[in-house]
Image (spheres, rainbow, N blue to C red):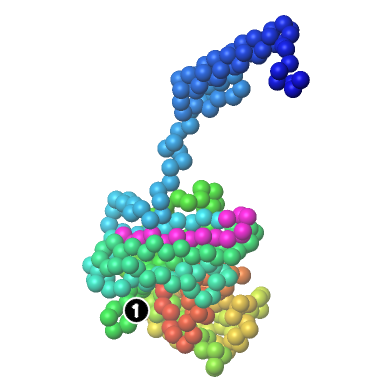
Amino acid sequence: MPPRFATQKRGDLKTEETQEMEEKEEVEMKMEARRDILAHRGSLSVRSWYPVGTVLAGLYSVPPLNEVVAPPPGMATRLCFSVEYRHSREQLMVSLLRLGNLPPRFHSNVMLVELRLLPNERRPRQAKARGTGPDPEFSDCFIFQVSRVCVLQSTLSVCVLSVEQDGKRHAVGRVLFPLEGELGQAGRVLWRDLETEDDTQCSELGDVQISLSYSPTLQRLSVVVLKARGLQLMCMFFVGVCVQVSLQIHTQVVKIKRSCVAKGETNPHFNHRVTFKLRSQHLDEACLRFEVQQPNDIRSGERSTQQPPALLGVLVLGPFMYARGPQLQHWMDMVNTPQEPVKLWHRLARAT
């Protein structure tokens, strides 16, 4: 006879009853577990559904990149952006979001942003604002291919430009963002104040304004020391202030030139122009060293003794081998815009 018509024994009936009871108990256990889950909704559980802890959703909420985020209080011109490094692909992703608190004279102009990853990227990536006004938006994303080792030694440079209707560009300011120590919290929305030339707050030792230009055809580096401000004069017997400019390749000093002495001022005007012969292949190996000096002229009766000049501060402009921050950016801007003078204020540092 077919198996379906086979008579079932009593033992088989007990087995079926046992299976039904086990299934019923299993259903009850699942229902109890479900009630336990509902009672501890939002908690983590393991095995017998013992609650471990609650997830705080606020710690993991990141504003979408296209969401307009209010700038922090204050009237400074600021840039809103986001930086994220993808380790698996060795890619640095930079998202430009918006500008905030632009000065009124730029409200009707088109805003342009140039991004570089120093010291490798020589050709800038550009982004154009979607609109005008005090808070123009961008919503652009850029990807830089950079290794895990080099990304920690890199600096993100963001230069904000204002373009008039006739095509003339004016520098609004820049943001220099060192990546070392800033990649731990990826995807954060960051606000950074623009560094502008209108900021007249002097550094501790004073500032000096330098103009650089390079001609690849003539293989010539032109340097103009324009003026200084906030210098800290060191003695009462002085005849003025001068600037010594030296061109250095590796550890060898190629040439030294000194400006005329500007008579006794803390904010002297030099307008001292010097040129150096420099081949293009040496642009990554050379640097400029500026020394602001105060000559001493000590008089004793009718005799005058010339003493070594007092050093008020030093400045080094050059590639990544010698400089960082604004000093490196100034050199890179000179290299990337041949035959166009690039003017910038720099802080003086102490001699080491």
Q: Is the magenta stretch mostly helix, strand or loop?
A: strand
Give the percent coordinates (x, y) of residue 136. 31, 64
Residue extent of the magenta highlight: 86-100
Residue type for callout 1: Arg
Residue 18 vertical placement versus 124 (above, below): above
Left or right? Give the position of 177 relative to 130: right
Q: Name the residue under label 1.
A: 169
Which quadrant holds residue 9? top right
Q: Which residue is drawn at 66% across and 75% down?
A: 251
Front residue of 322/350: it is: 322
Which quadrant holds residue 103? bottom left
Q: Residues within 10 Å of mark 1 (few under 14, many from 20)?
A: some
Left or right? Give the position of 63 relative to 144: left
In which quadrant of the rendered image does the C terminus lie?
bottom right
Q: Residue at x 41, y 62 (%)?
A: 96
Q: Residue at x 57, y 76 (%)?
A: 287
Give the percent coordinates (x, y) of residue 93. 51, 60
Q: Which residue lies furthest to the right in this view?
A: 1
